[in-house]
Image (cartoon, rainbow, N blue to C red):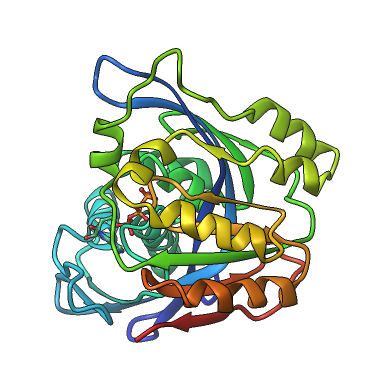
Amino acid sequence: MLFRSFMGQPLHLKAYGKVNLGLDVIRRREDGYHEVRMIMQTVKLYDRIILERNHSGRISLRTNLPYLPVNEKNLVYRAIDIIRREYGIKDGVSANIIKRIPVAAGMAGGSTDAAAAFVGMNQLFSLNITQEKLMEYGVSLGADIPYCIMRGTALSEGIGEILTPLPPVPGCWFLIVKPGFSMSTKFVYEHLTLDEHTVHPDIDGMVDALGRRDLDGVAGRLGNVLEQVTKQHYPAIDELKTIMNKNGALNSLMSGSGPTVFGIFTSREKAENAARACRRHPAVRQTAVVRPFNKSLHAKPSVHTNR
Ligand code: ATP
């Protein structure tokens, strides 16, 4: 991610968000973690992380969101701290976190910021840490962080640390809609019941569809077992999915533990049109029309925030 930095020269990083095209929970482990099978897709909606070395001997954070912690509760702080301790770094580090990924919304915003901080620290101090080792540090902080370091389309298994790269989702646009409420991942997992009535998404079928570059096959298999929990508390999830599907989406789904809802569209125009329809829903606070992350694509995302 971007430039080599020396003392006083800032390092600019982009921390991309993700959506889950498929999210299945296999079982709850004895240690309380959940064993999952997820299909992850990076999207071109990103936070900016600006890291800088200084002589203060400590870590300092700033962010554009007044309600985000700027101490050790922030995952960026913790990632910087891990690397400083592991490599005996005495220099101070400042991080400016410019958030655009909705917070506590199922898009791995905190995890991807931490991933960028791990990668950035490696560059800032020329540590030559391998990606594999960075992913090891990452999983000690959060199950989604190794994926956020790897990015792209991937099958994520175990607690999220067993990653298999997959062929990229075929050319499409995502409409991302964030309602004005947040969902705690912990709460959703705690309230998930897995029994014979649970409808599990067809993860293997989606892997096959990706292999065939079959967008309809991917869209037709969107599924998330966590939707049943979040939907009980927020009917807006289903309402937004209906609006998207009536306005040209191939299909739509809640991402992660929600409440972000996304739709898959074959053109930017269709996605923008559905975004206008979604913004008329009173629960909607933020919409974004973005491409999946794919290095060969350079289209600019359009982000709209309701006041
Ligand atoms: P996931 O999809 O991995 O479950 P999420 O998108 O639902 O994550 P986050 O945006 O990562 O949720 O935020 C979850 C909590 O993490 C928030 O309550 C927030 O206070 C805390 N947090 C710590 N560091 C950050 C960060 N850099 N950005 C966003 N949230 C952070």
Q: Please identify the quarter of the rendering in which residue 27 is found.
A: top left
Query: Looking at the image, is 4 positioned above or below residue 73?
Result: below
In the visual, does 27 lie left or right of 293? left
In the visual, does 76 lie left or right of 256? left
Can you give x and y, in whole percent of width and height, for residue 287 in the image? 49, 73
Query: Looking at the image, is 72 positioned above or below residue 284?
Result: above
Can you give x and y, in whole percent of width and height, for residue 78 in the image? 23, 55
At a point 40% along the width and 15% down the height, the residue shown is 195
At a point 44% along the width and 71% down the height, the residue shown is 281
Residue 130 visible in the current orientation: no
Residue 307 visible in the current orientation: yes
At a point 38% along the width and 52% down the height, the residue shown is 235
Can you give x and y, in whole percent of width and height, for residue 91 in the image? 22, 70
Ligand 1 quadrant assignment:
bottom left
In the visual, does 297 lie left or right of 175? right
The total of numbered circles placed on residues is 0
Can you say which quadrant of the picture contains the N terminus? bottom right
At a point 43% along the width and 54% down the height, the residue shown is 237
Can you give x and y, in whole percent of width and height, for residue 185 in the image? 30, 44
Can you say which quadrant of the picture contains the C terminus? bottom left
Front residue (pair 144, 278): 278
Q: Please identify the quarter of the rendering in which residue 137 is found.
A: top left
